[in-house]
Amino acid sequence: MGFLTKEIARNSAKRDMVLVDVSELGPAGEKTEVWVRPMTAREKDEWQMSMVSGKGKRRTLDQSDMSAKLAVRVCCNENGELIFGADDWKWLTEKSGKALTQIFDAAAKLNGFAQADEDKEELLKNSGTTPTCDS
């Protein structure tokens, strides 16, 4: 067993990725997959802050479009390069809820979110909203 040092952390490049079936987003009848990768600490912070609105004591948690906002930060090509731009979440919200849930669940596991489905339920419960039916 080794211990982490600043040098080891700085030189670490390992990023596990997984293939996720998102056939609902591809051409009809054709299997379509996307690579999902872990976020950097900055990407994770940006994703979390994208769900906060207001300032100071007036800050509220808004989880609308949560899955799409996560997808643009984790969907990548085989080289780990993101395939979506930062604002692409806006049109992704109109796409398959099932595909976005599959991306969310894979990203949750890769990024250390405990039990993806239960996390989403807990977030929704804490926000005072109720889940809606995915398309």
Image: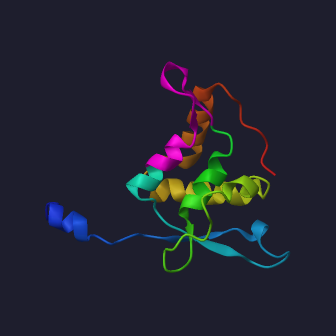
Residue at the location (61% across, 28% down)? 127
Residue 117: x and y in percent read: 59, 45
User: Which of these two is toward me, 126 or 90?
Assistant: 90
**Would residue 25 appear left or right of 107 to someone viewing this image?**
right
**Would residue 4 appear left or right of 119 to someone viewing this image?**
left
Residue 30 vertical position relative to residue 66 in the rendered view, above or below: below
User: Which of these two is toward me, 27 or 44?
Assistant: 44
Residue 58: x and y in percent read: 55, 21
Residue farthest to the right, as pictured: 28
Residue 90: x and y in percent read: 72, 53
Residue at the location (34% across, 71% down)? 14
Residue 48 on the magenta segment:
yes
User: Which of these two is toward me, 65 or 88?
Assistant: 88
Residue farthest to the front, as pictured: 55
Residue 39: x and y in percent read: 45, 59
Q: Is residue 24 visible?
A: yes
Q: Is residue 1 visible?
A: no
Residue 11 vertical position relative to residue 87 in the rendered view, above or below: below
Looking at the image, how many numbered discs can be counted on the residues?
0
User: Which of these two is toward me, 38 or 60?
Assistant: 60
- Residue 64 lies in what quarter of the image? top right
- Residue 98 lies in what quarter of the image? bottom right
Residue 40 on the magenta segment:
no
For the magenta stretch, what is the residue range? 45-62
Residue at the location (60% across, 59% down)? 86
**Quarter of the figure with the N terminus:** bottom left
Residue 135 vertical position relative to residue 5 in the rendered view, above or below: above
Q: Which colour assignment does the render follow?
A: rainbow
